[in-house]
Amino acid sequence: MIKGNSFMTKRNVWGIIAIGLVMFMTLLGYFYTPYDPSQTAVLSRLQPPSLQHPFGTDHFGRDIFSRVLVGGRVSLFCGLASVSMGAAVGVFLGLWSGFQGGFWDEVSMRLSDGLQALPAILLALLLATVWQPGVAVILWSVAIGNVPIFLRLTRTQTLKIKAQPYLEASRALGASDFRMMFCHTLPNLKDALLVQFSLSLAGAILVEASLSYLGVGIQPPQPSWGRMLRDAQSFASLAPWAVLIPGFFIALTIIGFNLLGDSWIHRRYR
Amino acid sequence: MSRYFWQKTVSFMLTALLVSAITFLIVQILPGDPALLLLGTEGSPQAYEQLRNELQLHRPALVRYFSWFSGFFQGKWGSSLRYSLPVTQLVAEAIPLSVGIALCAVVLALTLAIPAGIFVASNPQSRVAQVLAAGSQIGMAIPQFWLGLLLIQVFAVRFTLLPAGGSDDLVGLILPVFTLALPRAAVLTRFVNVGLSEALEEDYIRTAKGKGLPWRTVLYKHALRNGILGVFTVAGLQFAQLLAGTIVVEQVFALPGVGQLLLAGVLQRDLPLVQTLVMLIVFLILIFNLLFDLCLGFLDPRLRYD
């Protein structure tokens, strides 16, 4: 068991570099963009990457570098917010059904079976039909989609921990269910939950990008990487860079979160 | 066998019932009057009344759910609000294409992933295996629509080898099938690798090697049979991802399948069409999961006697 040093494993370093780059660019976008991301310039449209426009320009002459800097913030925000919501509900239900067992355990397991059979993207399409397409659709569908994942994970781990002698001891000392759930079980779930949180973030960003690409996610004028790909598709043979670059950043973010999650798994089972 | 069979079948039916309830009721539970939301701001009071009648909003939600649910299984799928055509007809035109490319993609993903996974597990130190493992990591992360656009760029625009879409002939379906299959193959490669690597560390492998069996027999007969079982479970789940992926891939390659129909339904706010299509896709996913589970029970006797 090497705990302290193993944080900087090879995978982890790559994951941290990828996420660090994306975070840095997104934060930079709040303070500085070389051009106004929604400023159109008809004369300089579909220009290949150059010194003035490092990533080129799109079909309205907007600077793609500036749009990339700004386009990540909704993805990251949506990912963080929706996975946090889903995780909070899922962890709570998982702890509860792991501890209570019996009828309510059965009910929550069946419910999570049902939710798991409904991919987040389908749920989002269903919601987008009734509401306007937009951020709310992504938030809700990804959050709901993550509930069963966290529920199952927490429940399985809770059942394992429940059988440990230290929980028996705390029950013997008169601890309430609530105390045993939150003070003794939850801290022991930290590693497993962190791994899943990171992997779920990658999934959430993929769903957001797919929905924005399909036109039912983030709506213009708000720039988003998925939407930029959608708009660039019709000009793909004239301006391949407009397709390559936003997709690269989506992939980079997803790889980064996947690697981070993976490296935590390796750290745990080392 | 029969007990396992019944367990799986009953749990399949329960899940189908639950998902259908979620699909139908989520729209009713969420705040707002569906008819008002569907019409948007331009609706006239007459149109509102008409839509309320069409959606039968004067009846309680549960009653509507049960009539919709029983209708779904009798093939009474109602008619689309915008196309004024029966949903059955729209679906019948779109479904062969979608299910066709999905099935081709499953087969392709498995044929790519199983040899790749075996190779990586049996020669973990070789250069090729490391490239394959890294490729599988990247393949899992690449968004499907980006992969599709990249494939179009390379094979249709740069080298003009393959058409960039269209469903008129089978050649046009090569790129979509690859786009669907590659990310799934990446995930499956990893599972084959993990399953096989774990099996190779078992005691019975050492015994088999110790009694002088050729490596080939040890690998394929002893390790693979045990190591690959987990892959079938995952393959069922991957099929769900794959069907959801067809929505995106059909958009990339402009294929007139179920995904395009669904997307048109969403953008035109055609609730009956969308609900039926979502239910249909989920139902297909569940049926495939059931089939995979039953195959697994057939392949792995341990499951049957649990």
Image (cartoon, rainbow, N blue to C red):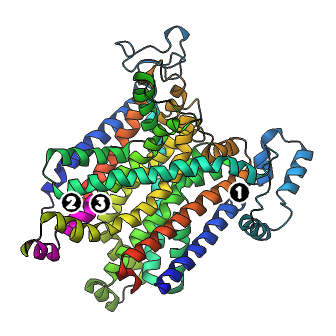
Whether B201 is among the magenta residues is: yes
Label 3 SS: helix
Q: On residue B150, which mark appears? A: none
**Residue B151 inside the magenta-drawn segment:** no
Same-chain status of marks 3 and 1? yes
> What crowding class fits label 3: few (fewer than 14 Cα within 10 Å), some (14-19), or many (20 or more)?
many
A154 left or right, relative to B104: left
Point out the tag, 3 or 1, that comes first from the N-terminus.
1
Label drawn at residue B192: 3
Other-residue count near label 1 (Cα within 10 Å), few / some / many at <14 / 14–19 / ≥20: few
- Local secondary structure at mark 1: loop
Residue A269 appears in the rendering: no
Circle 1 chain? B
Magenta residues? B191-209
Q: How many marks?
A: 3
Task: From the viewer's side, name the closer residue of B177 and B149.
Answer: B177
Identified by mark 1, the residue type is: Pro
**Horizontal side, residue B89 vs residue B189: left or right:** right
Residue A229 location in percent, x, y?
49, 31
- Asked which quadrant contains residue B204, the reply is bottom left
Q: Chain of mark 2?
A: A
Q: Position of residue A239 (x, y in %)?
A: 46, 19
Marks 2 & 1, CB-CB < 8 Å contact: no
Residue A263 screen position, x and y as percent: 24, 54
Query: Could you say which quadrant of the image residue B121 lies in?
Result: bottom left
Residue at mark 3 to residue at mark 2: CA–CA distance: 22 Å
Q: With respect to residue A51, does B137 lie above or below?
A: below
Q: Chain of mark 3?
A: B
- CA gap between label 2 and label 1 equals 44 Å
Q: Which mark is residue B31?
A: 1
Asked whether, in this view, residue B81 is left or right of residue B286, the answer is: right
The residue identified by callout 2 is A267
